[in-house]
Amino acid sequence: MYRIILAAAIALGATTLANANETPAPPDARVYVINLEDGATVQSPVTVIFGLAGMGVAPAGVEKESTGHHHILLNRAPFGDGADDAEMIANGIPSDENHLHFGGGQTQTSLDLPAGTHTIQLVLGDHFHVPHNPPVVSDVITFTVTE
């Protein structure tokens, strides 16, 4: 019985890994921040409203063509320049203080950030939290939080 369960777990993991970064994105898809401009000065909490064109929003775990859910890359290198980007493409976006998940299909959030300079970038993830192919990412927005 143990061998059957182990074989099933290995097969499931291999299937997930084989499908990593194979969820297609329409060529005209784009994600963007609606309410913050690069260089803005704001107070905390910071409301971030997500924009999406050419695709729809679906919660994590829901596999539906041309959909995804939002993630924020906070205070880290832009997507494509990050040390963990290859891992994200292969296995999904991690969940930590620099990678914020909105797997419920949320289209905005409020971030409680300390005073100082911060960066955000939106990345759309598929039902497994894996960036689409090609990745649907916003421009990086740099803003300053005042006290």
Image: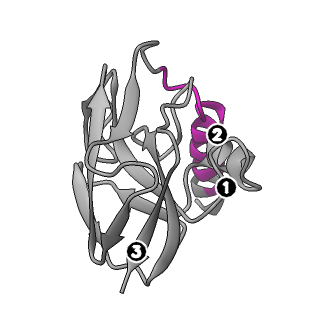
User: Label 1, label 3: how many angstroms apart (C-alpha)?
Assistant: 19 Å
Which of the marked residues, 2 or 3, is nearer the chain's N terminus? 2
Instruction: Tell me the kind of residue under disc 3.
Output: Val
The residue range painted magenta reads 6-24
Where disc 2 sits, the SS reads helix
In the depicted structure, whether residue 37 falls above or below residue 31: below
Main secondary structure found in the magenta portion: helix
Cα distance between the residues tagged 2 and 3: 39 Å
Is 18 a magenta residue?
A: yes
Q: Position of residue 122 (x, y in %)?
A: 44, 46
User: Which structural element holds mark 3?
Assistant: strand
Disc 1 crowd, CA 10 A, few/some/many (<14, 14-19, 20+): some
Q: In this rendering, would 108 be left or right of 11?
A: left
Image location (x, y in percent) of residue 28: 41, 14
Q: Which mark is residue 17?
A: 2
Which of the pair 145/107 is nearer the observer? Answer: 145
Residue type at the position of mark 2: Leu
Quarter of the view holding residue 125: top left
* Observer-nearest of 50 and 134: 50
* Residue pictured at 46% horizontal, 12% vertical: 27
Residue most extreme to the top: 27
Residue 106 visible, this angle:
no
| Residue at the disc numbered 3 | 145
Question: Could you tell me which secondary element the residue under label 1 belongs to?
Answer: loop
